[in-house]
Amino acid sequence: MKRLASLCLGLCTIVFVFLLSVSPALAGTSTPVNTTKAPRIEVGQTAKTLEVMTIEFKKPFSTLPVVILTPYWKNGKNQSDNIDTIDSITLSGFTVYSKNRADNYFLNWIAIEN
């Protein structure tokens, strides 16, 4: 239950930060924004056991999504040494690079249709 609460809190934070980052881009624009259709959102948690990993979406997006990720070091007693970095994003997935990897090191991620 504690892990689920932590994951939910992290994802809520990610969505809030995403909305903050998008709103300045929309301010002052005359381009109409579709407010009737909710964007497709996919979330996941992936064990980070390799230096470079490609994470595939369950179903490809129709437009390039925005992907945000956060680390989760289960029972980790120290901070991670490197920043997990998204190297590339495609309609079907994304590639992450960092030297962080362990059996108990995970990436929580969210992909939001752009």
Image: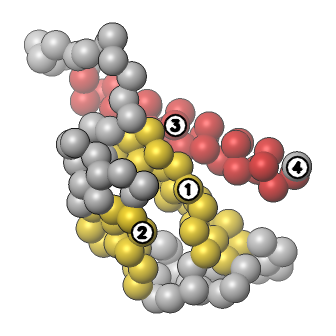
- How far apart are labels 2 and 1 at the CA level? 9 Å
Query: Helix or strand or loop: what does disc 3 sit on?
Result: helix
State the image quarter where residue 39 is shown: top left
The residue positioned farthest toward the front in the image shown: 59
Residue at (30% x, 72% y) in the render: 87
Q: Nearer the viewer, mark 3 or mark 1?
A: 1
Amino acid at circle 4: Met
Comes first in the chain, label 4 or label 2 = 4
Question: Tag 1 or tag 3, which sits nearer the N-term?
Answer: 3
Which-is-in-front pick, marks 4 and 3?
Answer: 4
At a point 21% along the width and 43% down the height, the residue shown is: 63
Q: Quadrant of residue 107?
A: bottom right
What residue is shown with label 4?
Answer: 1
User: Mark 2–mark 1 contact, CB under 8 Å?
Assistant: yes
Does dot 1 land on a helix, a strand or a loop?
strand
Q: Quadrant of the rendered structure where residue 70 is?
A: bottom right
| Mark positioned earlier in the residue sequence (3 or 2) | 3
- Three-letter residue code for mark 2: Ile
Secondary element under disc 2, as helix, strand or loop, is strand
